[in-house]
Image: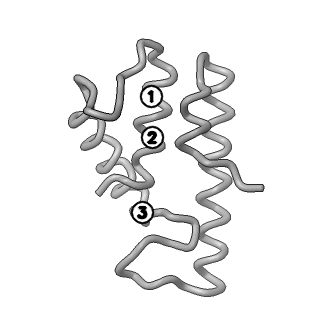
Amino acid sequence: MRTDLLQLSDTVTDEPSFIAFLWAMANEWNESEALEAAKPSSPYGPTVLGWENRSFGSIMEAAAAWADASADGLPLYEKPTNTWQRAAQILAMGKHYE
């Protein structure tokens, strides 16, 4: 069963769990790339695994944009006090945020 990166980011509490999150994110990216190479999704939507952003640069741009937008929290998002968790959430949103 595939790990949901957003849910996993909520479980990050320290450096070891952050590193585990990074591995999960890398593994999902690599799986998505392999699936897309075999059977490409439409270039106008997300990949088969839901990656809206399809390059390292666009993922980092989206993560930074979401970090800016959520710096003070959002209506349905309470910014965590744990900086490891916040960093994981920022990176996870690089997958989805446009």
Q: Kindly indicate whether the residue at mark 1 contacts the one at mark 2 (C-beta within 8 angstroms).
A: yes
> Which disc number belongs to residue 87?
1
Kind of residue at badge 3: Ser
Identity of the residue drawn at 61% across and 81% down = 37
Whether residue 88 is situated above or below residue 31 in the rendered picture? above
Mark pair 2, 1: CA separation: 6 Å
Real-space CA distance between mark 2 and mark 3, rounded to the nearest whole angstrom: 13 Å
Q: Residue at x 39, y 62 (%)?
A: 53
Residue 52 pos. (x, y %): 41, 64
Image vertical order of residue 82 relative to residue 53, above or below: above
Quadrant holding the C terminus: bottom left
Label ID, residue 56: none
Q: Which residue is mark 3?
A: 55
Horizontal side, residue 91 vs residue 39: left or right: left
Q: Tags 1 and 3 in contact by the CB under 8 Å rule?
A: no
- Residue 49 image point, x, y percent: 57, 66
Q: Nearer the viewer, residue 77 or 47?
A: 77
Packing grade of label 3 (10 A; few <14, some 14-19, many >=20) is few
Q: Which residue is mark 2?
A: 91
Q: Nearer the viewer, residue 8 or 55?
A: 8
Residue 30 falls in image quadrant: bottom right
The location of residue 60, given as percent across then percent down, is: 36, 47
Q: Residue furthest front?
A: 76
